[in-house]
Amino acid sequence: MSKFHTFSVWQAVIMHFAYDPTGRRLTVMTDLQTPVATAEPRRAPGYAAMVVGATSNQAGAATGALAFDAIGPPGVVAVRQFVAAAVLVPLTRPPWRQMSWSQWWPALSLGLVFAGMNLGLYTAIDRIGLGLAVTLEFLGPLAVALGSSRRGLDVLGALLAGLGVYVLVLPSSSTDLIGVASGLFAAACWAAYILLNRTLGTRLPGLQAPAVAACAACVLTTPIVIHLVIDGRFTGAALGAAVAAGVLASVVPYCVDLFALRRVPPGAFGLFSSIHPVLAALAGMIILGQTLRINEFAGIVLIVLANVMVIGAQARARRVVLAPDVSRRHR
């Protein structure tokens, strides 16, 4: 009797969605249950999907930045939240009336983190550029990964990341400290986002938690929208760029991530995510005309290497733990 690996993104995965450099795409970070069979799907389409999603994500971040002159980072963030809610709520249909306070409070907290993460990231993009902002933001999930491990290699990864930040910024009297602080604030919010999702993963199924959080973020950012409308700052071009950012940085990556996760091991998915700072730098260069200095490029490389080192080591450790259990299931 043939055995099939039936991998359901909705049931076999605890999903952590993080908005990327652009108010951020919905990035999926997963912890799989032990598989019950081994027939693997073709992986090439999955890797191709990851390339499409990552490229769309960073292009969306750069497109959103085109609206900064008209509506500023807060305006782009507000539109992004409405786009995310418009996609997630009809898809998941959260049980609003049946939700208990133990479900409401982390979901509302997640909405606050959503808004803070996106605002911090977009402010950093506006002040220090897309590539640097995204690189600093990626310190958030790296910190969570480091916090859950005690291996010596992870300590080395932390030191490498710290060196990367120093090289990236090279503090001086001309350093935009507000921009750097905004990027680090976005990183802290991303770390909080992941931890809150761990709580919500046991209280709301599937994507209902991000849907509720997106609605909460919409409520928080509605005053921004009202203010911009009254001031007449929502030009057609600005609104179009902000909506395009929402589609490119949330809708497209969300769809292709679900497709990719059915075909690519979660460890490989996590490792590939480390390429986002590089793609962000390229998007900033091509779409926004932003260029990197030598130290900025070197800092990005060091932080990417730190991510690869830590995530790769944890992925290998997870395979070692799962392998004996899988073998026992097939005896």
Image (cartoon, helix red, strand yellow):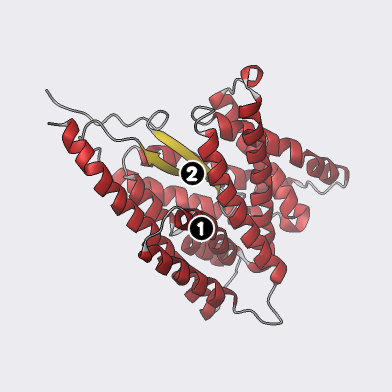
The image shows residue 97 at horizontal and vertical percentages of 66, 17
- Quadrant in which residue 59 is drawn: bottom right
Q: Residue at x 57, y 35 (%)?
A: 210
Pointer 1 local density, CA inside 10 Å: few below 14, some 14–19, many at least 20: some
For the C terminus, the quadrant is top left
Q: Is residue 5 above or below residue 289?
A: above
Tell how many labels.
Answer: 2
Pointer 2 local density, CA inside 10 Å: few below 14, some 14–19, many at least 20: many
Q: Residue at x 51, y 58 (%)?
A: 143
Residue type beneath disc 1: Ala
Q: Residue at x 71, y 82 (%)?
A: 173
Q: Outermost residue, front direction?
A: 150
Q: Outermost residue, bottom direction?
A: 173
Q: Nearer the viewer, residue 322 or 186?
A: 322
Q: Is residue 218 above or below residue 191?
A: above
The image shows residue 294 at horizontal and vertical percentages of 51, 80
**Which element carries disc 2, helix, strand or loop?**
helix
Taking 313 as reference, is 192 left or right? Answer: right
Determine the CA span between mark 1 and mark 2. 23 Å
Residue type beneath disc 2: Pro
**Which element carries disc 1, helix, strand or loop?**
helix
The image shows residue 3 at horizontal and vertical percentages of 17, 27
To which residue does mark 1 refer?
143
Q: Nearer the viewer, residue 247 or 129?
A: 129
To which residue does mark 2 refer?
253
The image shows residue 213 at horizontal and vertical percentages of 63, 35
Q: Is residue 54 above or below residue 108?
A: below
For the N terminus, the quadrant is top left
N-term-proximal mark, 1 vs 2 = 1
Q: Is residue 25 visible?
A: no
Taking 156 as reference, is 103 left or right? Answer: right
Q: Nearer the viewer, mark 1 or mark 2?
A: 1
